[in-house]
Image (spheres, rainbow, N blue to C red):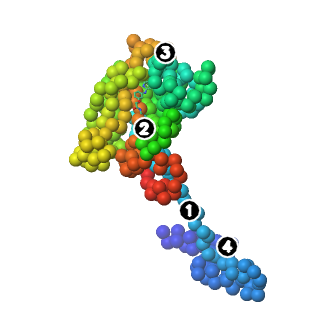
Amino acid sequence: MEQLLQQIEQYKKEIAAIVPNGAESLEAYRIRWKSRLDPGAAGPARNIDLSLPGDATPLGTHHPITLVRDRIVHIFGRLGFSVAEGPEIEDDWHNFTALNLPENHPARDMQDTFYIHQNPDWLLRTHTSSVQARVMERQKPPIRIICPGRVYRNETISARAHCFFHQTEGLYVDENVSFADLKQTLYFFVQELFGKDVRIRFRPSYFPFTEPSAEMDINCRICGGSGCSVCKHTGWVEILGSGMVHPKMLDNFGIDSTKYTGFAFGMGIERICQLQYRVNDLRLYSQNDVRFLKQFTGAV
Ligand code: 2NL
């Protein structure tokens, strides 16, 4: 020990010899710098004190949509789901036809979808299911992915509707995937996101790409169940849609529907953001108002 301390002292001396001011206090350093300034110099150089700390660079914050998306990705990542991405400009096959949305489906209407070109149809994707379609096209089961991304709908902009928003969809295809797996996975997800005390309920629903289909509600995190405008005084809020992948869809991609089953789900990120941070106007997300964005400083 003694020897080690001596050694350190020796090093200190050697370093001080190489870096002459190494042992100097910050205050002494400043005084020395100031004394070097030439009081006779003209202009701004006269008052420059190079020893002062520089101006701090203000750090930005994560956008609330990014915060929530990353949290969703992290939770599903722990369950073995990897992230898949795809183009925002899609063709008819990946956005509609392959997903079992028939020719006369209302979503295909010009009123609802932004078309870039017709015949052949090119459009702004209306959901991220198109990404899952692209994955099923090139990858065979087991498939376990989530697809976060921006989607577009031809809506009049208001507090409750926007012409673009963010979704996360998920897909799990393998042998013996059941509705019980769907329920347990989604229950785990909301427990991680909202806390262990969260309660869930499923309501039967309809989506063209799943059968059976169900919407999942959680008990209202805003009012705790006593009734408020977010839960429309029911105590429950819908947070996602889900179901067992329609066998037709699996067959569309050459996945044997007699051997494989799967579940899928989709949720709006803005909606979850509203529940977590009480953002009640969708327009705030894209107005770039720093008074809004600064409120997320330090949020993780
Ligand atoms: C919702 C409902 C849902 C899916 C999305 C899906 C995708 C493929 C196959 C089967 Cl490739 N299903 N996606 C399924 C059920 C519901 O979204 O409310 N989204 C915001």
The amino acid type found where label 4 is placed reads Val
Q: Earlier in the sequence, mark 1 or mark 3?
A: 1
Quadrant containing ligand 1 = top left
Q: Which residue: 54% across, 56% down?
A: 60
Disc 3 from disc 4: Cα separation: 72 Å
Give the structural element (helix, strand or loop) at label 4. Answer: loop
Q: Cα distance, mark 2 to mark 4?
A: 59 Å
For marks 2 and 4, give the one nearer the viewer.
2
Residue holding disc 3? 252
* Relative image position of residue 239 (x, y in whole percent): 35, 37
The amino acid sitting under disc 3 is Asn
Identified at 55% across, 31% down, the residue is 114
Helix, strand or loop at disc 2? strand
* Numbered disc 3: secondary structure: helix
Q: Above or below — where is 86 with respect to 13?
A: above
Q: Measuring 44% from the left and 32% from the top, which residue is drawn there?
A: 169
The residue to which callout 2 is attached is: 268
Question: Are circles 1 and 2 on residues that touch, CB within 8 Å?
Answer: no
